[in-house]
Amino acid sequence: MTAPKERKLKSGWPQMVKFTFALLLGGATFSPILAFAETGTCYHGVNISGAEYGDAAGVYGTNYTYPSERTVQYFAQKGMNIVRLPFRWERLQPLLGNALDEAELSRLDEAVELIRSHNMSVVLDPHNFGYYGETRMMSEGLTAADFANFWTRLAIEFANQDDVFFGLMNEPHDIPTDEWLTSANEAIAGIRATGANNLILVPGTNWSGASSWENPFTGGSNADLMAKVKDPFDNFAFEVHQYMDEDFSGTHDSCPQAKQAEEALSNFTRWLKDNSFRGFLGEFGGSASEECLAGLQAMINVMDSAPEQWLGWTYWAAGDWWPEDEANNIQPTSKGDRPQLAAILAAKETAVSRECETQN
């Protein structure tokens, strides 16, 4: 195992203030951190599930877990170069507006360093669906300022590590689009006030589905409203999810809407291109059936054909505790690799990608 990369910024509110004044005074300049592949997407990886399990009172090692060395090494050896890392907001910040929990932050940090030590990038993913416990964002008791406070504190811990990306929130739902836009923009402003220039992945509301991106929703469609995202460093991408089952939820074994999922990604690609945006497919998956395997390959091919729009993808899901009989499971068994792994790696190999580099 190689030594983890040295942190470029340690935690502490005084540093945040220093960065804020540097930004306000014009003393810092930043450039985009991602270089695109000539052919094919830059990032291809997997969600390693486990740290989002249970509720806020869950006990580490009993109710939830972080990725093991064995699992991270397995996917790194298969050629994957990014891990989306789900965790729970409530455990990392037990009291809104207050400091992050030191023990939980240490576990998160150790997981990030483990992944980085295998030369893989990390997407930090508060896997909360737009909620803090039972409280919905942008309702009484949970404001955009609370969300920005959380991300400001977390950004300080991982600022300017060019292989750590900030995924604002997993699948927000039940939140009007205009209100979610306000939350996202305040969180982005908080992150940038620390001086952190990490790539930010911004979802839409309504589960952030590619298939529903242009659909009418309370407060407006994602396509109309999320085009108003504001990032002073202009270093963000839109994160969408897409499944192929009967309701696009990823909870069924069959893939009757594989073609529709492929078309959804094509339509989202057009939206990205028309608006000069970038995209990232944070979740997609399917069972080992022929229609699902073909659908997985088709979706990756859509992204590989538009590398200027797509940064890459992370398959859902793997994890040391992920149920073996879960249809989408890509964690290896005692018999070896899952069929889905071969399908997504086969699609990936059709692209000739140069190494993706980051720069500050």
Image (cartoon, helix red, strand yellow):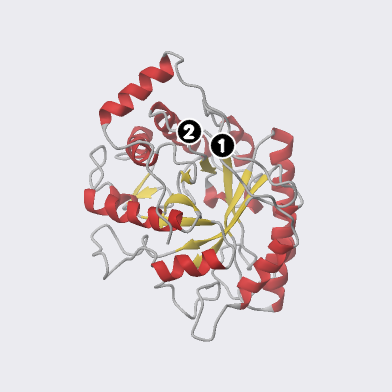
Structural distance between the alpha carbons of marks 2 and 1: 8 Å
Q: Residue at x 29, y 40 (%)?
A: 141
> Quick check: 269 above or below 49?
above
Viewed as shown, does residue 346 lie left or right of 281?
A: right
Residues at marks 2 and 1 touching, judged by CB atoms closer than 8 Å: yes
Q: In terms of secondary structure, where does tag 1 sit? A: loop
Task: Give me the disc on residue 166.
Answer: none
User: Amino acid under label 2?
Assistant: Asn
Viewed as shown, does residue 287 lie left or right of 297?
A: left
Look at the image and tell me whether residue 171 can be seen.
Answer: yes
Measuring from the top left, give residue 191's x and y in whole percent: 41, 33
Q: Residues within 10 Å of mark 1 (few under 14, many from 20)?
A: some
> Quick check: 46 above or below 222?
below
Q: Which residue is mark 1?
A: 33
Measuring from the top left, give residue 261's x and y in whole percent: 69, 60
Q: Which residue is mark 2?
A: 197
Frontmost residue, 43 versus 228? 43
Q: Quadrant of residue 11?
A: top left
Q: In terms of secondary structure, where does tag 2 sit? A: loop
Measuring from the top left, give residue 260's x and y in whole percent: 72, 60
User: Amino acid under label 1?
Assistant: Ile
Q: Residue at x 56, y 37 (%)?
A: 33
